[in-house]
Image (spheres, rainbow, N blue to C red):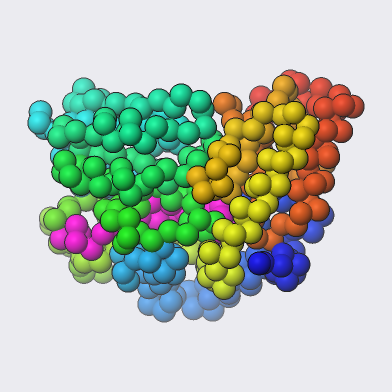
Amino acid sequence: MIDPQFYRPQFDSLQGCCHLISNSLGAMPNRAREYLREYAEIWQTRGVRAWNDPWWQMPREVGDMIGRLMNTPADCVAMHLNVTSAYATILSCLDLDERRNKVVVVDMEFPSTIYLCREWLRGRGELQVVKSDDGVTIDVQAVIDAIDDRTVLVPLSHVLFRSSYIMDAQAIIAKAHKVGAMVVLDVFQSLGTVPLDIRELGAGFAVGGCLKWLCGGPGACFLYVNPDLQPSLTPRFTGWMAHEQPFGFDTSAIRYTTGSYKFMNGTANIPALYSCRAGLEIIAEVGVEAIRERSMSMTARLIELADGNGWNVNASRNPSLRAGTVAIDLPNAREIAAELNARDILVDYRPKAGIRLSPHFYNTDDEIDHAITSIKHIVNDGSWKKHASIDRVVT
């Protein structure tokens, strides 16, 4: 079992706050500051020569670090600024026709993915949305039944962002492949807190980022492309880093390189690649299996305490189907979340979910108890009312 006190000295960002929001932004490791200082030093002393050593190779190196956490082959993970651009790269590889022009998605998918797919299909195909009956789970059989020989793509979150429900990705991927459709597995809410083996799942694509459970900060997202698919895919959303001779600056038709860089486009976000390395190293050191064991204990504690107060919990009661977040929904939840943040108890609020609390391996049971006690006090003393006019809460 993980002892959080062993790892907390590596996170000065945990001082002075109760950080229970790793599903939105992981705590900053001290090493991230050191790596960003290294970036500034190299930029200052090496100047343009830094592109030769070490900047050009960094996307591949960081991609491989991410790949090892989900058991992918080397040089199969391309780095992107955000998941939307990673998705756009995938869509640019695919064609629609009258025979195959349907995308199947669940209504609890992250909105950005739905927006992008709907616009990609506009006037050319159908977006079939499978709805949740309870706002927490999805009937996996309903998803499987929606996938047919007209389906070209199934965007699928491994863990749903609102309810932290773990989808049966393997069953959905198997059905999609049976009818010739492709699945993009979004692992943003799972990688780093739920064990994940992409090769075992058989996913053709996976997307995610270092922002959340990987404690890597913004701007370092990724796209995995199964090596068996790579030769047959030609991304239209591309750029100079995908060229086999990028420094030739040839303006004729692009000749694609191989491996992960084939699925990149413009210049990489080098500062983000420096900052995300720290979290990736620490997660690998702690071990995702151990993190999962600790997470299941903490989320169970949150549910027990919420039940004791009579609050509605929007999370699965089955620990094997619940990832790292527990959403507690009660009257004035948005305003309560704002007051929690004002008291340095870092959480967030999402419509149709409630107050999301997401403990990670560095959190203690005392912090969980403190958060629940604080919610009770805020409800009782009415301090949430000062936030009644807010338009938005910290994301």
Question: In the image, what residue occupies the spot 60% across and 33% down?
Answer: 314
Start and end of the magenta stretch? Answer: 207-231
> In this rendering, is residue 367 above or below 313?
below
> Does residue 119 appear in the picture of this structure?
no
Q: Name the outermost residue toward the front.
A: 318
Taking the magenta stretch, the answer to whether it contains residue 209 is yes
Q: Which one is in front, 283 or 43?
A: 283
Q: Which one is in front, 171 or 182?
A: 171
Q: Position of residue 223 (x, y in %)?
A: 35, 55
> In this rendering, is residue 244 above or below 301?
below
> In this rendering, is residue 156 above or below 9?
above
Question: In the image, what residue occupies the spot 51% across and 27% down?
Answer: 135
Q: Which one is in front, 205 or 304?
A: 304
Q: Which one is in front, 85 or 44?
A: 85
Question: In the image, what residue occupies the spot 78% across and 43% down?
Answer: 371
Q: Quadrant of residue 200?
A: bottom left
> In this rendering, is residue 245 above or below 132?
below
Q: Position of residue 33 (x, y in %)?
A: 65, 67
> Does residue 327 appear in the picture of this structure?
yes
Q: Main secondary structure of the magenta part?
A: loop
Q: Quadrant of the C terminus?
A: top right
* Left or right: 328 as drawn, with respect to 149: right
Q: Position of residue 382 (x, y in %)?
A: 86, 24
